[in-house]
Image (cartoon, rainbow, N blue to C red):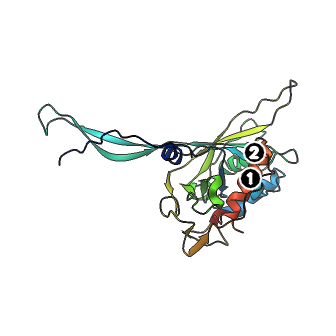
Amino acid sequence: MASVSVAPSSQKISQIKSKLLNPALTSHFMIYLGLPRDQQGFRQYMAENALALDQDRLQLSCCEASLPGSTLATTELRNDFTGSTERHAYRRIYQDRIDLTFYCDAEQYMAIRFFESWMKFIMNESGSSGISKENYSYRVKFPSEYKGCGLEITKFEKNINQKNPVVPLTYKFVNVFPVAITSMPVSYEASSLLKCTVSMNYTRYFIGPGGSEGTSSSFTFTGDPTNPLNAFTEGLDLNLNLPKYDSEINLFDPAGQANFNFNQAFNSGLPSFLQ
């Protein structure tokens, strides 16, 4: 097949604007974080840590996340063609973890207590009397109990309420659980926001429904809108003709940006945020 070369041509300013001056912004995103599969057992550990979980508030407090990446492992072939080396893919390799950063509220330090409870639940650390002993030993729970029902990171744009919005990009993670909580320094110096950064391990990720199809203002998610923890089983047609976003929100303020993210994601009808 002959190659086709494209000759350079002049572009109008209006063409350049329409093609280049509409970049995606990093500050418009929302997460959904599921609980471990053994939710009843996990809630007992949250009670031991005096945690009154507000899952919507916890998700809203996520101020930083990362869209995941992956690589393809290849094998090298040298003898099929003289003087040529070929590489063929045989495995997809996912990153071993993803980092999430949360603002810590001043009422109960929800993010810290939540992930500490989860890690305590994984290691089966029930009660404080036993773990304080020098000869205490751990007995880890089965993965089917402590791995989470799901983690989703949805990337969207401010034009989600316009005529032809960008279809939200939703990354869904399988078998997530926390593997590390980063230390959080405190100091008598000038005060700053206390943040909790957690590393989550996962088996793999995939782009969920609505992430790769559809260009109009109406597209289809598949899922049960009343229970985001269930597998996607039912069709739901969502229309994105939303009211204009509140221009009075200060997007340079962390609380204002978080409020905007929550409202836009909720109003868009994303299945993770429907109650």
Rendering coords of residue 147 (x, y %): 60, 55
Helix, strand or loop status at disc 2: loop
User: Dot 2, how many residues are within 10 Å of its Cα: few (below 14), some (14-19), or many (20+)?
Assistant: some
Task: Check the image and name the residue furthest to the left.
Answer: 82
Where 251 falls versus 42 (above or below)? above
Q: Are discs 1 and 2 less than 8 Å apart at CB?
A: yes
Q: What separation in Å lies between label 1 and label 2 (alpha carbons)?
A: 8 Å
User: Dot 1, how many residues are within 10 Å of its Cα: few (below 14), some (14-19), or many (20+)?
Assistant: many
| Amino acid type assigned to the residue bearing label 1 in the image | Phe
Task: Please identify the quarter of the rendering in which residue 21 is found.
Answer: top right
Image quarter (top left, top right, bottom left or bottom right) of the C terminus: bottom right
Rendering coords of residue 9 (x, y %): 36, 40
Where 62 falls versus 219 (above or below)? above
Task: Check the image and name the residue furthest to the bottom.
Answer: 234
The residue at 49%/43% (across/down) is: 16
The residue at 47%/43% (across/down) is: 12
Q: Earlier in the sequence, mark 1 or mark 2?
A: 2
75 lies left or right of 120:
left
Give the labeled residue for mark 1. 260
Q: Is residue 125 visible?
A: no
Rendering coords of residue 182 (x, y %): 69, 35
Residues 16 and 62: in front is: 16
Helix, strand or loop status at disc 1: helix
The residue at 40%/40% (across/down) is: 10
| Amino acid type assigned to the residue bearing label 2 in the image | Leu
Rendering coords of residue 176 (x, y %): 58, 52
Residues 160 and 123: in front is: 160
Count the numbered circles shown.
2
Q: Is residue 6 visible?
A: yes
Where 42 falls versus 274 (above or below)? above
Give the labeled residue for mark 2. 251
